[in-house]
Amino acid sequence: MRIKRIRLAAFVTALCLLPPLISGCAGPVVAPAEVPEAPSAGMAAPVTDPTVTTADALPTGGDVPAAAPAGADTGIVETEELLDISGAAPTAAYAVLFQMAIKPEKYAGKTLRVKGLYKSYYDVERDIQYMIILCSDETMCCAQGIYLVMDAPPPPEQLPPDGSIVTAEGLVEPYTMEDGTPSCRLIHTELLEVLPAA
């Protein structure tokens, strides 16, 4: 009887822990098969409307992360034309990318330099190379990424291996995904540095 109670308690505990393990703190992860269809080759994500209003898309409940308390040294370098988060503290870089995803118009036209984990996916049917850089927070609980669009993407075999640490620079462009979600991406992207996976 005692063994059955222990097994039941372990099962209930596992069920309670399962949702955070599946979805993380930012919600469910989108699988590559759920990536929206893009209209033409060479684009990292679809464009339906380059001008987008995000007021209705902002999260409710105050889940917007702050990069750091005022006056803290985050490693972020910002000028009128450039936002460099390549040397930023992990949580600060994550927070900037999160803000860009929900308020893309605020960063439109700004050059972004970012360093993070590189992932790619080549869609053979559509002849599209999807490339992304992910930045995780300090705890490695949450990650936020940004799509990279190169003017002339090389063939998949010449791209950095998945899991590389890549520094990239490009121009921030807002766009609307096919499901109506506003976001942003880096266009005219150049890969500045590629380091092997840690």
Image (cartoon, grey):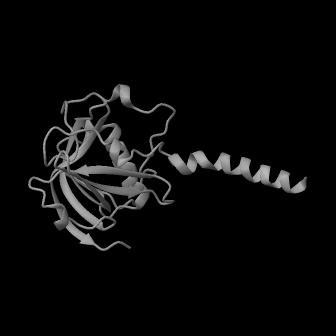
Image coordinates for residue 80, horizontal then vertical, percent: 19, 48
* Image point (44%, 40%), residue name: 64
Vertical order, 40 against 191 (above or below) = above
Residue 184: which quarter of the image?
Answer: top left
Left-right relation of 169 to 30: left
Q: Residue at x 14, y 49 (%)?
A: 42
Percent x, y for residue 10?
Answer: 75, 53
Judge by depth and name the residue closer to the eye, 38 or 101. 38
Left or right, 116 with reference to 154: right
Quadrant (top left/top right/bottom left/bottom right) for the C terminus: bottom left
| 133 shown above or below 192 | above
Residue 72 seen anywhere in this rendered image of the structure: no
Residue 81 coordinates in the image, percent (x, y): 17, 50
Regarding residue 74, the answer to whether it shows in the image is: yes
Residue 88 image position (x, y, % from top left):
35, 61
Q: Quadrant of residue 197?
A: bottom left
